[in-house]
Image: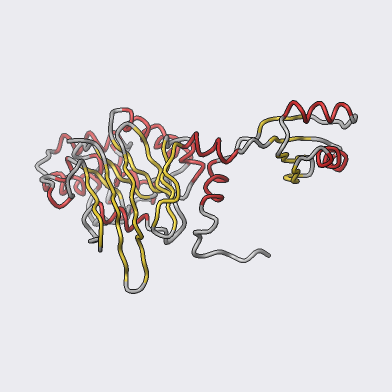
Amino acid sequence: MEATIEVTGLRKRFGQTPALDGMSFTVRPGHVTGFVGPNGAGKSTTMRVVLGLDTPDEGSALVGGRPYQSLRSPLRHVGALLDAGALQPSRTARNHLLWLAHSQGLGARRVDEVLALVGLGPAAKRRAGGFSLGMRQRLGIAAALLGDPPVLMLDEPFNGLDPEGIVWIRGFLRSLAAEGRAVLVSSHLMSELQDTAGHLVVVGRGQVVADTGVAELIAAASGGRVTLRTPARSEAMSVLAHAGATVTVTDRDTLTVSGLAAEHIVTLLNRNTVPFSEVAAHRATLEEAYLELTRDAVEYRGAAR
């Protein structure tokens, strides 16, 4: 089975509210694809449509070229984590997975393998109801991996993980993609996706805003800006503005300069005897790039104080 998720022209309304408005993108094998957007952007609805839990008004969602409903033993084709709390709290972790495994014709050996993969081997006989959120996330990932599927969809898998768990899941997701799987990860934590995802699908108001590589998106957001550190902020601003640059204050001794190359900035500051400690090409964070892209698609916005 081909390891892809293909979403084409999805439209979906809940009453008078449009949840999806022509959503289209493809998740390809060999990459971790980040799926990001503000609350209400349509991420969860899209994932539910892919898994056949919601029916679109228009469009299609295919896993390996086929609708989810047509897949026999679906856990062998696509593994999903949508809600880490969706478990029977009185069952042990191992029994929770055994129940799922038996429904797909899988045996106890595979259950023990995935428990070990996600680091829950020592907790296999503990009741899942007593698990922390981070442990429930690991159990949900284990369930998604039961059928050794070529396609994985994980909704907010970083939630509740401690720092060690976050480091683990970054490398784990990259290793799953390196095996040739298509891995779609929905998250609000841009800092985690920056170190995990190679590709990004950014959505807003039910539509795709950007479908691009993470490196390309960061480069575009960096926009040729230069970071300048100087103890003589006012003098530097005056010299650079006079030369035609756009200068903004980002910290007590830090300026961001647009419109002049770093080499030209150094020449100007030296010529005017303005002291400085650093001149470097500005590298935007993924969070900066994301906020710029979704600025007009935010549904709920707090007021500034």
Q: Is residue 200 left or right of residue 249?
A: left
**Image quadrant of residue 270?**
top right
Image position of 5 (left or right of 202): left
The one of 153 and 60 positioned closer to us in this rendering: 60
The outermost residue toward the bottom is 16
Q: Please state the horizontal and vertical placement of residue 15, each as a whole percent of the image.
A: 32, 73
Q: Is residue 178 visible?
A: yes
Numbered-mark total:
0
**What's the residue at 51%, 42% (across, down)?**
191
Which residue is at a point 51% across and 60% down the rendered structure image?
298
Would you say residue 160 is visible in this rendering? no
- Position of 265 with respect to 10 (left or right) is right
Q: Position of residue 164 (x, y in %)?
A: 45, 37
For image coordinates 25% across by 52% down, the residue present is 50
Q: Which quarter of the figure is the C terminus placed in? A: bottom right
Q: In front: 116, or 166?
A: 166
Pick the front one: 169 or 5:
5
| Residue 87 screen position, x and y as percent | 26, 55
Q: Quadrant of residue 276?
A: top right
**Left or right: 64 as drawn, with respect to 136:** left
Q: Residue at x 29, y 28 (%)?
A: 179
Q: The N terminus is located in which quarter?
A: top left
Percent x, y for residue 10?
29, 56
Quadrant position of residue 176: top left
